[in-house]
Image (cartoon, rainbow, N blue to C red):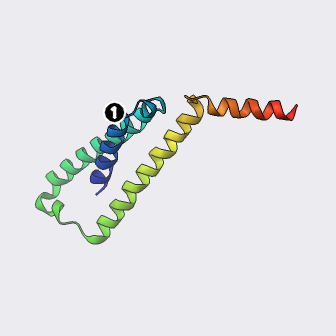
Amino acid sequence: MTLLITVIAAVVSTVIWYSSEKARKLKTGVLLYMFWGASLMWLVDAVVEYLESGAEYFQPAAADMLNDTFLGLSVIALALVIWVIVLLVKDPTGALKSAILDKKAKSK
């Protein structure tokens, strides 16, 4: 389930990055690299687990699927938090810098 969730997130972020110049300016490339990296990691994990357990891999318990869903959603949330931090540090549109300068100018 984590593989499926991260692949969907990777595809969506790639489509957004590819179709929008504004999205590229907002560093969505960071998101797609994180999502594709997580997808690749879980693909390797799935292959290794399939090699170890065989056909049982395709019959997970409901609790395992729920845990994997929470893990996948947690990874997406963490990637979004990292992306916001990158936006705040890089400030590609200059919004944070102008807000800080406006606040300083008003306080004088």
Say which of 66 and 96 sits in front. 96
Residue 97 appears left or right of 92: right
Residue 106 drawn at (x, y percent): 83, 34
Q: Which residue is mark 1?
A: 18
**Seen in the image, is 42 located left or right of residue 91?**
left
Residue pictured at 31% horizontal, 54% vertical: 2
* Rendered position, 103 above or below 80: above
Question: Which residue appears at 22% of the width and 51% of the height?
Answer: 46
- What residue is drawn where x is 78% and y is 35%? 103
- Look at the image and tell me in which quarter the C terminus lies: top right
Give the percent coordinates (x, y) of residue 19: 34, 34
- Label 1: few (<14), some (14–19) or many (≥20) C-alpha neighbours in 10 Å: few
Residue 79: quadrant of the picture? top left
Give the quadrant of the N terminus.
bottom left
From the top left corner, tell me how far across and down residue 44 is, in percent. Answer: 23, 44
Which residue type carries mark 1? Tyr
- Residue 26 to residue 40: above or below: above
Residue 86 rendering spot, x and y as whole percentages: 53, 35
- Given residues 12 and 90, the one toward you in this image is 12
Q: Would residue 65 appear left or right of 30 to someone viewing this image?
A: left
| Picture layout, residue 48 above or below residue 53 | above
Which residue is at the front of the view, 44 or 101?
101
Furthest residue toward left? 55
Classify mark 1: helix, strand or loop. helix
Q: Residue furthest right?
A: 108
